[in-house]
Image: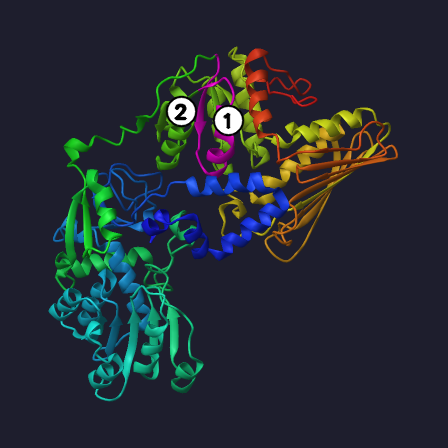
């Protein structure tokens, strides 16, 4: 599916994703045509790691991992790569009796097994399997192992022959056998107990046929993809149950289980993703499941492109196994840095990037690529996004070795754009290594982390290191914001600010909502707008209050700020608005005058002598100017400004845009 989607034209992609087209149209209306084109091109340009079934040996384990040791043979849902980093709950030990080739089918076998678990078959029941591809043929075998009678439906004579080899009766749809009549005979006139649909088709016919085949109160489970225009009469008269199976077991798409390694108690959730993996491997070890007849092709990983061409063509194929070099030839996990581009710039500033996610690859790295700085290394968790960014922007090396980046004497500045929970740690490590640091907001997630940063800066200063720290509050560098700042210098008295942010909803399970990883949206994003008002007011915040909507995830709220000079500001950060409404609007009132600033495109003045408006052809949120300022402040000035009376630490202090 991914290969076909990647090869499709823009029009074909749009037809497959009408909801994305609506998002694009909304963005054109709020942000303008050119920024929308840039955003769409960035999204389409992002590489996707292929694959999710693999077998290998453990090369290293993370902190707290006790169930696996270096050298263990494991199957996992890692990507197709020589080295993959896999969460602990998505790996399973391989029994000695199971070959590597067979174990490579563990994850796809778990998909079949999860569909069976939802059907809840009992000994002697008759079950129809519609679609005899890889998942369907594994489903046939697992049902037979549970003592079920199985009827398989497909158009492919070769797959039908395999199903018969595994003990199923079959119906050849290519010769127009009547599947409903065949199911009636197969069930001895009673109707089948259940239907598992493992086919991939846009047609609604498999669902209609499944309902027609079932007995009263039969069960239908969809594992594959079909049309879902259901007939109420089909389901109403027989009181049928219908369920869609979610991948390979309980825990799928739950970040607590998959990413953090929190297992479900076995007394309450018997079959998780990992325990389904183990069950499949046990079936392979006992011989009740045989996947070797399903292997139609084998390719060396160097020929993987040919493998993908095969499976996306009309040529017959079933299970395609990719083989990697043997351990002695594959290198080691330490081989984690790849040269991508030659050294192209001579500069006093040599930058290493930590993180190459969506924002870094789409905004930050291109902004620094426009500066005179030398871009030496980018690190990323899995290497794919980092290598893509390196190729696109001429970065010399792509790596997954953060320690080597910190130790590199050539790199004198880091740009950090990892998840929020790691920002403080990276800043402290950078100070200890004597490197200047640009860190995306937020600087820290807790006051304790902030104190750690202050101590690290103090320690670096005591060692004579003039290290600079800059937080990526780019909006203060936007040209229209700079113009507002100029105008406010001529305004007397206190000022009033109203910042309205149509932030949009983000699911509660998203990492930014996790208090331990993202810190929540106030710490993670609303800080941008607090900083913006602080910059425009030009004076410290004296006090603040917050009013929060009780319903939802806590990201619809208003923050009231009182500044030291008597100015006031309000940040309305709302997650309950429509995407068709512009994201950011600022209103400023000062000395009988007003400014209205809409979404970094239009700035209009009311009552300002010599100023009426400043409009841009395209949005400019200040990212490029922010990146340029880091180089200027961090290296041309060559020093830090001390802040905090008697504090004894060194931080870069922002003043009038610096």
* In the depicted structure, whether residue 434 falls above or below residue 285: above
Q: Secondary structure at mark 2?
A: loop
Badge 2: few (under 14), some or many (20 or more) residues near its Cα, within 10 Å?
many
Q: Position of residue 636 (x, y in %)?
A: 57, 11
Q: Position of residue 114 (x, y in %)?
A: 31, 64
Instruction: Please name the residue shown 50% across and 56% down the image.
Output: 19
Instruction: Please name the residue shown 64% across and 54% down the image.
Output: 576
| One can see residue 638 in this view | no
The residues colored magenta run 348-374
First along the sequence among labels 1 and 2: 2
Badge 1: few (under 14), some or many (20 or more) residues near its Cα, within 10 Å?
many
* In the depicted structure, whether residue 159 falls above or below residue 297: below
The circle drawn on residue 427 is 1
| One can see residue 60 in this view | yes
Residue position for label 2 = 395
Seen as rendered, the residue at the extreme right is 592
Residue 368 covered by magenta stretch: yes
Q: Position of residue 97 (x, y in %)?
A: 12, 53
Residue 658 covered by magenta stretch: no
Q: Quadrant of residue 540?
A: top right
Question: Viewer-proximal residue, 542 or 582?
Answer: 582
What whole-number distance in Å separates the C-alpha atoms at marks 1 and 2? 22 Å
Q: Quadrant of the C terminus?
A: top right
Seen as rendered, the residue at the extreme bottom is 189
Question: Viewer-proximal residue, 323 or 468?
Answer: 323
């Amino acid at each position: 599916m991914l290969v076909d989607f990647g090869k499709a034209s823009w029009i074909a992609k749009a037809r497959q994703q009408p909801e994305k087209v609506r998002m694009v149209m909304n963005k054109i209306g709020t942000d303008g045509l050119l920024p929308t084109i840039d955003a769409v091109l960035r999204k389409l340009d992002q590489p996707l790691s292929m694959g999710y079934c693999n077998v290998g040996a453990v090369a290293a384990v993370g902190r707290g991992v006790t169930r696996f040791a270096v050298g263990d043979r494991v199957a996992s849902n890692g990507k197709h790569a020589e080295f993959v980093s896999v969460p602990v709950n998505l790996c399973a030990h391989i029994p000695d009796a199971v070959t590597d080739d067979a174990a490579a089918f563990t994850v796809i076998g778990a998909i079949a097994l999860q569909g069976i678990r939802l059907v809840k078959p009992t000994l002697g029941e008759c079950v129809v399997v519609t679609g005899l591809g890889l998942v369907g043929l594994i489903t046939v075998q697992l049902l037979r192992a549970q003592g079920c009678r199985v009827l398989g439906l497909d158009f492919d004579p070769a797959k039908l022959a395999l199903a018969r080899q595994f003990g199923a009766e079959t119906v050849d749809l290519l010769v127009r056998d009547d599947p409903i009549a065949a199911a009636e005979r197969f069930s001895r006139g009673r109707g089948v107990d259940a239907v598992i649909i493992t086919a991939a088709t846009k047609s609604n016919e498999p669902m209609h046929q499944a309902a027609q085949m079932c007995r009263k109160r039969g069960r239908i489970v969809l594992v594959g993809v079909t049309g879902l225009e259901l007939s109420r009469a089909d389901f109403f008269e027989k009181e049928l149950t219908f369920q869609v199976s979610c991948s390979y077991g309980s825990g799928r798409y739950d970040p607590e289980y998959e990413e953090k390694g929190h297992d479900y108690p076995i007394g309450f959730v018997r079959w998780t993703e990992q325990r389904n993996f183990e069950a499949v491997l046990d079936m392979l070890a006992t011989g009740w499941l045989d996947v070797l007849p399903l292997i139609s092709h084998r390719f060396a990983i160097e020929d993987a492109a040919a493998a993908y061409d095969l499976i996306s063509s009309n040529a017959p194929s079933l299970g395609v196994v990719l083989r990697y070099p043997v351990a002695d030839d594959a290198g080691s996990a330490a081989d984690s840095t790849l040269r991508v581009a030659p050294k192209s710039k001579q500069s006093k500033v040599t930058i290493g990037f930590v993180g190459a996610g969506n924002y870094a690859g789409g905004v930050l790295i291109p902004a620094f690529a426009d500066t005179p700085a030398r871009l030496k290394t980018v690190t990323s968790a899995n290497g794919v996004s980092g290598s893509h960014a390196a190729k696109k922007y001429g970065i010399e090396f792509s790596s997954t070795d953060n320690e080597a980046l910190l130790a590199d004497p050539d790199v004198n500045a880091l740009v950090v754009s990892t998840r929020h929970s790691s920002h403080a740690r990276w800043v402290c490590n950078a100070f200890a290594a004597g490197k200047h640091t640009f860190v995306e907001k937020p600087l820290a997630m807790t006051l304790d982390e902030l104190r750690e940063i202050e101590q690290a800066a103090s320690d670096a200063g005591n060692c004579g290191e003039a290290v600079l720290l800059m937080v990526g509050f780019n909006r203060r560098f936007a040209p229209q914001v700079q113009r507002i700042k100029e105008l406010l210098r001529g305004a007397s008295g206190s000022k009033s600010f109203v910042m309205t942010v149509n932030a949009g909803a983000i699911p509660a399970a998203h990492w930014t909502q996790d208090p331990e990883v993202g810190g929540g949206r106030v710490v993670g994003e609303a800080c941008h707008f607090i900083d913006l008002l602080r910059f425009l007011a030009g004076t410290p915040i004296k006090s603040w209050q917050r009013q929060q909507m009780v319903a939802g995830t806590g990201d619809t709220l208003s923050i009231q700020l009182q500044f030291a000079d008597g100015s006031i500001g309000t940040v309305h950060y709302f997650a309950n608005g429509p995407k068709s409404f512009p994201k950011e609007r600022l209103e400023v009132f000062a000395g009988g005058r007003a400014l209205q600033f809409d979404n970094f495109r239009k700035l209009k003045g009311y009552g300002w002598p010599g100023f009426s408006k400043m409009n841009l052809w395209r949005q400019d949120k200040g990212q490029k100017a922010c990146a340029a300022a880091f180089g200027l402040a961090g290296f041309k000035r060559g020093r830090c400004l001390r802040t905090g009376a008697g504090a004894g630490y060194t931080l870069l202090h922002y003043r009038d845009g610096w």
